[in-house]
Structures are given as structure tokens and as C-alpha cells.
Image (cartoon, rainbow, N blue to C red):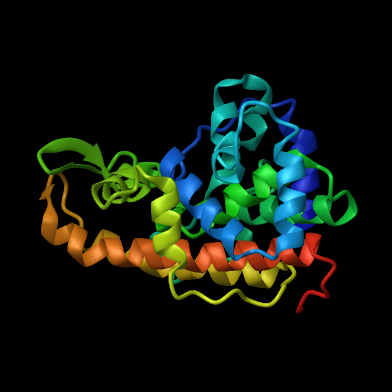
Amino acid sequence: MMYFKFLGAVMVSVFIAAMPSTAMAYGKHGHSAFCEAAYQLAQPQTRQHIDALVAQHSNYDNFGSFCSWADDIKSDKKWDWAKPHHYVNFPRSAAKVREDDCPVQGGCILTAIQHHYDVLKHDPEDWQALAFLAHFIGDLHQPMHVSFADDLGGNRARLTYFDQPTNLHRLWDTDMLLRRGGEDTFAKAKQLIDGLVAESPITITGEKTLKWANESAAITRRIYSNYREGQDLGEDYTAQWEPLLEQRMQQGAQRLAAILDGLFANNKAEK
């Protein structure tokens, strides 16, 4: 099972050299808007519980900013074991992500999500598990976090965006979002949830996370089919792809809210 694979990986990884990170996540603005959207979709009892956990960490004012903790700790070597948990790589020759694409040594985002969900089931007061879970659900719905190892998930795929040098990963993490008003994270969150309906509480299973990963993988393949080394992108690309980026944020926010409702709102989660 993925859960036991993850536990073994954590025990091993504290004794081995850290794997290089191939992902920088949505960026602070993206994760903040994503988690704020999930927070607003969650039930009042869930929000109350989240607020109590966030209050334990004085560096963060709200759930949105709290969701960047998993990125903020990357500069601290004691957390190096968690770097591979922001993404999963799959072969360019493969049609989809498989469970075996998660390394036994080190794990990946799929095993990490399952692990931190299981921790919260047994200890709902574990703020670190909440921070990791919320962050990784966001990462899983950003297509470039389900990508290819040979170019570090698009970090080596160079291009320019409105005449500024960037790369494919950063384009999808940050650049397009900021181009469309993402700096105001509360306004972006309000925009994301406009018209959305909260889902019924759900549980995390390996099958669910693998399905969500393959949703991202299908988009990743489309992104690469349109990519050319050094290309100059601008408004046409943004108009074509940014709505899909926001759709993935909406899907992830709905799912995160439903997961947290299942954990914190005393509701029976759907299997």
C-alpha cells in the first residue's frame, strides 16, 4: 500500500542525501488563493478548527498564508526529506501515472497526501499534517507537479512571457496567475468560488489521488505539445490556458474543502 511505502521512505530519507526538488509549487499567491477558496467552501465547524490550528503558528495570519509553510521550510535542511513530496514524475513514454511511479525511497506527492491525511484522522490537532496536506492537494492540481524528471518538471523548459525570461514550471505556478490579478489573493479566492457548490465530505484513498494526478498528467501532455524551447508567449497563451489553470484550482479547492469537512466537521465522509 502507498501508506506503508511512504512510512518506510521517511525512515530511510533521514539517513540519505536529499533528492533535488523539481517543484516550487503554486507560489505564495497561488497557494494563498487556493487555500482561501477551500476555506470559504468548508463548513463553519471546519473553519473554526482550521483557525485554531493556524493560531498555533504566529508566522501566519490565516489559512491562505499558512498553506505556504511547506514551501517556506525548504531552506531548512531538516525538512529535506519532504522535498520529493511536492510532485510525482512519470515517463514521457507512459500514457498515465501509475502507483509505481512513486519511488520506494523518498516517496512522492501521492504517498505524502495519504500519509498526512491518515495522521489527521488519528490526530486532528496536528497542524503540520494540515499544512502539508493542504499544500500538497494544491500542488497535485497544478499540472506541472505531475510531469517529467528530465527537465525538472518544466523548470529547465525556458521561454519568455511578456518579454520576461521564465520557464514552463514558473509560468504555470506564478506568472499567469499574477497576470490575471492573483496578487490580491482574497479577491482571487472569491473569484474562484463564484458559482461553486461545496462537495460532500470525502475520504482520501490511493485511487482518488491517482485519479487526480492523471487529470493533471493529461493537461501536462497538452502543455508540452504546445511548448517550443525559447518561445515568446503573451496574451494569446494566457487567454488559452489560464482558464484551465483556474479550473484546476477550483477543482482542488472543492476537494480540499470536502476532505477537511470529512476530517473536522463530524460528518460521515463519502468513500
Query: Looking at the picture, does residue 185 appear above or below residue 245?
Result: above
- Left or right, residue 81 beside residue 3: left
Quarter residue 111 falls in: bottom right
Left/right placement of residue 78 relative to residue 191 reads right
Q: Where residue 92 sits in the image (x, y, percent)?
A: 38, 60
Residue under the image location 77 percent in, 67 percent down: 262
Q: Position of residue 151 (x, y in %)?
A: 35, 43
Of residue 5 and residue 271, the one placed in the foreground of this image is 271
Does residue 31 appear left or right of residue 131 in this picture? left
The residue at the point 58 percent across, 41 percent down is 84
Residue farthest toward the right in the current orientation of the protein? 122
* Residue at image coords 60%, 41%: 62
> Which residue does the image show at 24% across and 48% down from the upper left?
179
Kindly tell me whether residue 219 is visible in this rendering: yes
Pick the front one: 192 or 23: 192
Percent position (x, y) of residue 131? 66, 43
Q: Is residue 178 above or below residue 253?
A: above
Instruction: Give the quadrant of residue 245.
Output: bottom left
Please indicate, yes or no, whether residue 9 appears anywhere in the rendered image. no
Task: Please provide percent x and percent y for residue 78.
Answer: 68, 22
Which quadrant is the N terminus positioned in?
A: bottom right
